[in-house]
Image (tube, rainbow, N blue to C red):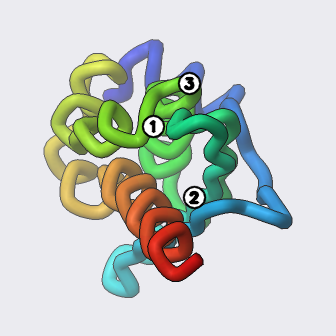
Amino acid sequence: MYSKKVMDHFMHPRNVGEIKDADGKGEVGSPICGDLMTFYIKVENNKIKDVKFKTFGCGAAIAVSSMVSELAKGKSIEEAMKITNKMVVGELDGLPPQKLHCSNLGADALHKAIENYLEKKKAR
């Protein structure tokens, strides 16, 4: 059984899409269960000004991606790196145990996008 918050973020996901000139991009996926998440971030003055995602997966994976995007928007890079998968599950009022391993990859994808941004910034 899914919580009302999970159903809301699944039925009305926030921040879906792609940022063509993203400052950072992160992708995670599990070929075993088929959930694939890609996060795109736009950074301004060390804050995540915009975040978008594309997720291929079950309802829980879409809800997780939506919640992560909402949690990250407006946060500093340091704050966004502190978002954990466990925190996301809490914000969604829980996920069924069988959905935790695959669906809850959102924070990992966000962190990869941030790491990608930091690598690009260092290379300049």
Q: Is residue 91 above or below residue 18?
A: above
Vertical comparison of 16 with 32: above or below:
above
Contact, mark 1 vs mark 3 (Cβ under 8 Å): no
Q: What is the quadrant of residue 69 in the picture?
A: top right
Q: Quadrant of residue 60?
A: top left
Amino acid type assigned to the residue bearing label 3 in the image: Gly
Residue with the mark numbered 2: 39
Q: CA distance from mark 1 to mark 2?
A: 10 Å
State the residue at coordinates (32%, 83%). Answer: 32
Which of the pair 18/12 is nearer the observer? Answer: 18
Residue type, label 2: Phe
Q: Earlier in the sequence, mark 1 or mark 3?
A: 1
Q: Amino acid at mark 1?
A: Val
Mark 2 to mark 3: distance in Å? 15 Å
Please state the horizontal and vertical placement of residue 81, each as a whole percent of the image. Answer: 30, 44
Which residue does the numbered mark 1 point to in the structure image? 68
SS state under label 3: loop
Distance from the alpha carbon under mark 1 to that under mark 3: 12 Å
Mark toward the start of the polypeptide (1 vs 2): 2
The x, y position of residue 112, in whole percent, is: 40, 66
User: Residue 61 or 53: which is nearer the viewer?
Assistant: 53
Q: Quadrant of residue 87?
A: top left
Estimate the x, y position of residue 93 in percent, counting from the top left. 28, 17
